[in-house]
Image (cartoon, helix red, strand yellow):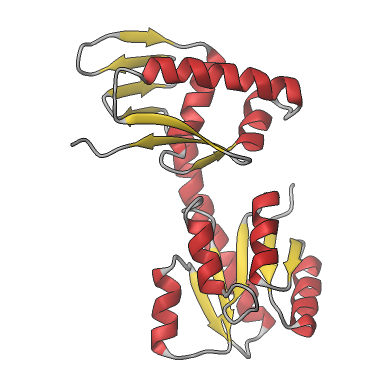
């Protein structure tokens, strides 16, 4: 079984090392950063299941870091560690997208219990998404099992290939979020090598053509990360 990957941002070297060692003993894979900018780079370069951020960090604080990450990923769990206990700070943490919040000092056992609880909730949410096979995308209904894309306005139907269907389903699951290029390649092509990447670009072009009748749908390229199926608000 793959280990759960945690991105830990903590500027206190002693606490950072202690947390890393404890979590690794508990069978997590930990990437540790010592400031907000380093953590953002690690997030962009890696593939993580959960983020643990100290609030007060040099170069970029935890709140700002969380806001930056939430712009591209609304689902990844974010957990704040902080010495602050003011109600306003707690509220700010949840406003920027925190899933949980714990004040220092804390016990490792409590931290582990909260992490486990967050992962259980998010896994349930992810599993629910992964089971979905019928999607409403703008003016279209997409039936993954039937490999059919139907335009609800004029009734036109487009039969999709298995790869077109798998790719559109991933985009639909992550609608208005970034679909990671490497993730899609590994799930659909089973390898994220250069040639498969070029093949996926061809399929993206085909899907853009299929969705073109709806002016409010776009598949946009997010440089260095992947693609995003964007559904604009109809005027």
Is 95 positioned to the left or the right of 156 in the image? Answer: right
Q: Is residue 138 above or below residue 44?
A: above
Q: Position of residue 118 (x, y in %)?
A: 53, 64
Vertical position of residue 184 compared to residue 154: above or below: below
- The part of the image, by quadrant, that contains residue 6 is bottom right
Q: Is residue 81 visible?
A: yes
Residue at 57% in and 84% down: 82
Query: What residue lies at 70% left-to-right and 58% top-to-bottom?
Result: 42
Nearer the observer, 124 or 4: 4
Q: In the image, residue 170 lies at what x, y percent? A: 51, 32
Question: Image point 46% across, 40% down: which residue?
Answer: 174
Residue 113 % position (x, y): 60, 73
Quadrant holding the C terminus: top left
Is any part of residue 145 visible from this angle?
A: no
Residue in the image at 72% along x and 30% along y: 192
- The vertical placement of 12 against 124, above or below, is below
Q: How many marks?
A: 0
Looking at the image, residue 26 sits to the left or right of residue 81; the answer is: right
Q: Is residue 50 shown above or below 217?
A: below
Where residue 158 sits, quadrant-wise, is top left
- In screen coordinates, is 59 left or right of 17? left
Please indicate whether residue 108 sits to the left or right of residue 202 in the image: right
Residue 204 placement (x, y as % from top left): 52, 22
């Amino acid at each position: 079984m793959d280990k759960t990957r945690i991105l830990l941002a903590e500027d206190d070297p002693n606490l950072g090392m202690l947390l890393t060692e404890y979590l690794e003993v508990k069978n997590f894979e930990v990437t540790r950063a010592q400031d907000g900018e380093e953590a953002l780079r690690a997030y962009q370069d890696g593939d993580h299941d959960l983020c643990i951020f100290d609030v007060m960090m040099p170069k970029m604080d935890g709140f700002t870091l969380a806001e930056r990450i939430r712009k591209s990923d609304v689902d990844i769990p974010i957990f704040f560690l902080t010495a602050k206990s003011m109600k306003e700070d707690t509220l700010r943490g949840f406003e920027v997208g925190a899933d949980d919040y714990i004040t220092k000092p804390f016990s490792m056992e409590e931290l582990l219990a909260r992490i486990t609880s967050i992962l259980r909730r998010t896994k349930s949410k992810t599993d629910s998404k992964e089971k979905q096979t019928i999607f409403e995308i703008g003016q279209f209904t997409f039936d993954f099992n039937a490999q059919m894309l139907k335009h609800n306005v004029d009734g036109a139907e487009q039969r999709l290939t298995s790869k077109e269907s798998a790719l559109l389903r991933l985009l639909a699951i992550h609608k208005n979020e970034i679909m990671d290029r490497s993730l899609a390649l590994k799930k659909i092509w089973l390898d994220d090598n250069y040639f498969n990447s070029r093949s996926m670009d061809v399929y993206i072009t085909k899907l853009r053509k299929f969705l073109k009748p709806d002016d409010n749908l776009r598949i946009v390229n997010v440089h260095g990360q992947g693609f995003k199926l964007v559904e604009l608000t109809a005027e």
